[in-house]
Amino acid sequence: MKTVLIVEDDMINARVFSKILTKRGGLAVKHTENVDEVMEIAESGEVDVILMDVSLSHSLYQGKPVDGIRITQMLKAKSSTAELPIILVTAHAMDGDRENFLQQSGADGYISKPIVDHQKFVDDVKAMIGE
């Protein structure tokens, strides 16, 4: 079974995503907003794709606040995690944001919140992992 790591600081969103992905998608999920854990889990090879919230309000790395863009950059810069697909998730979807976020971060895809079409959400996530 493929596993999705949800990096999200809003517990309600995290629960909604988990439910859609497990119930409708048949995927396993893990959740954390702890950046050290994100790095460890990514390195461990136990997840197949990361759903990365862009605006993480509580996440710190080495004592400094980081957002999803920064964490994605860090993962993409390491050879051990560079190949892991990362999908950015954001509520701030203005024209041009998508391209900027993707370019800045090196992420592989982009989903905007709120998730309206649950099946499309599952399909988009599965497409990233070749399911």
Image (cartoon, rainbow, N blue to C red):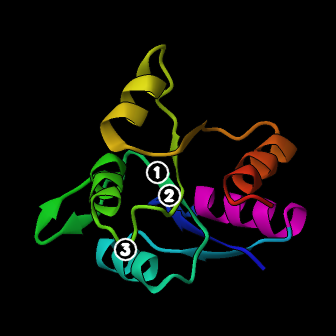
Q: Residue 96: where, in percent of width, then height?
A: 44, 16
> Which quadrant of the figure has residue 31?
bottom right
> Which quadrant of the figure has residue 24?
bottom right
Task: Determine whether label 2 and label 1 are within 8 Å by CB.
Answer: yes
Residue 18 lies, with reference to residue 125, above or below; the image says: below
Q: Disc 2 and disc 3: Cα gap in Å? A: 28 Å
Instruction: Name the magenta segment's main secondary structure.
Output: helix
Relative to residue 22, is residue 101 drawn left or right?
left
Task: Determine whether label 1 and label 3 are within 8 Å by CB.
Answer: no
Secondary structure, mark 3, is loop
Q: Disc 1 and disc 3: Cα gap in Å? A: 21 Å
Residue flagged by tag 3: what amino acid is it? Ser
For the record, the magenta segment spans 12-25
Residue 97 lies, with reference to residue 73, above or below; the image says: above
Q: Residues within 10 Å of mark 1 (few under 14, many from 20)?
A: many
Quadrant housing the N terminus: bottom right
Q: Residue 128: where, in percent of width, then height?
A: 67, 52
Secondary structure, mark 1, is strand
Disc 2 target residue? 10
**What mark, if any, has residue 53 been given in the picture?**
1
Q: Residue 84: where, in percent of width, then height?
A: 50, 63
**What mark, if any, has residue 80 been given in the picture?**
3
Residue placed at 47% from the left, 18% from the top?
Answer: 94
Residue placed at 12% from the left, 62% from the top?
Answer: 64
Q: Return the disc, 1 or 3, that comes first in the chain's sequence.
A: 1
Q: Return the disc, 2 or 1, that comes first in the chain's sequence.
A: 2
Residue flagged by tag 2: what amino acid is it? Asp
Secondary structure, mark 2, is loop
Q: Residue 22 colored magenta? A: yes
